[in-house]
Amino acid sequence: MQQTTIQKITTEEIKHLQINYSISDTCFGAMLTAATSKGLFYTGFATLDKDSFSDLKSHLPQADFVQQSDVFQEQAVAFVNKKTKHLPLLHLKGTDFQIAVWNALLKIPFGEKVTYQDIASWIGSPKACRAVGTAIGKNPVSVLIPCHRVIQSSGGLGGFYWGIEVKKRILLSECSVYN
């Protein structure tokens, strides 16, 4: 898989941001994708207790949302549907700590799992397991930045923003396709 990094949305960019969004079918269900002119900003699923469009808008409520597809969204759908191993460019809103955690998640190989403690150690903050967990929970592109590959030290799956069943399906899919 191509290694990608995350470009952070600046405070100045937030003032004038247009976000394109669309819904596409994926192997995990209907997925809402959203992108700025610089990269993918969001992926989400509709679940019984979450509405992905409302969730998207909560990340940048002042943005101008336009329903249209773009190349970043198409690349994300192709990646999720296992038609490519190449991630789209990512343009995300987050703190420096969150970006560091998300970049660490991008280094987890397909089909492998690591613990929150592993991620905390990788970013040089071995005692920050809870903060790492919080940053992982704020991941706006959770299917692309593989927070689903992070498990508890006990071996339990832990949580997943879009539900534990989606997490299980993603992990099983990766194991069967990439191993």
Image (cartoon, grey):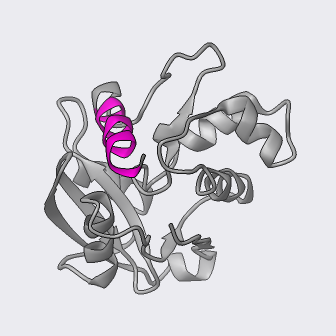
From which residue to which does the magenta span run?
166-178
Q: Where is residue 87 drawn, in percent x and y?
A: 44, 70
Where's residue 101, x and y in %?
67, 50
Residue 11 or residue 21, whichever sits in front: 21
72 w.r.t. 25: above or below: below
- On the image, the x and y values in percent for residue 153 come to 66, 19
Describe residue 169's horizontal placement relative to residue 97 as left or right. Answer: left
In x, y percent, where is residue 155? Answer: 57, 17
Task: Kindly report the secondary structure that dominates the magenta region of the rendered protein.
Answer: helix
Write down the quadrant of residue 82 in the picture. bottom left
- Count of residue discs: 0
Q: Is residue 121 above or below residue 109?
A: above
Magenta stretch: includes residue 98: no
Residue that extends furthest to the front in the rendered view of this protein: 179
Which residue occupies 50% across, 22% down?
A: 158
- Horizontally, residue 24 falls left or right of residue 108, namely left
Residue found 54% across the figure and 40% down from its top: 112
Q: Is residue 141 left or right of residue 156?
A: left
Is residue 20 visible to us here?
Answer: no
- Residue 174 visible to an observer of this rendering: yes
Residue sitting nearer the eye, 102 or 176: 176
Judged from this view, the residue extending furthest toward the top is 154
Residue at the spot x=25%, y=83% of the render? 70
- Which image quadrant for residue 41? bottom left
- Residue depicted at x 30% and y 58%: 80
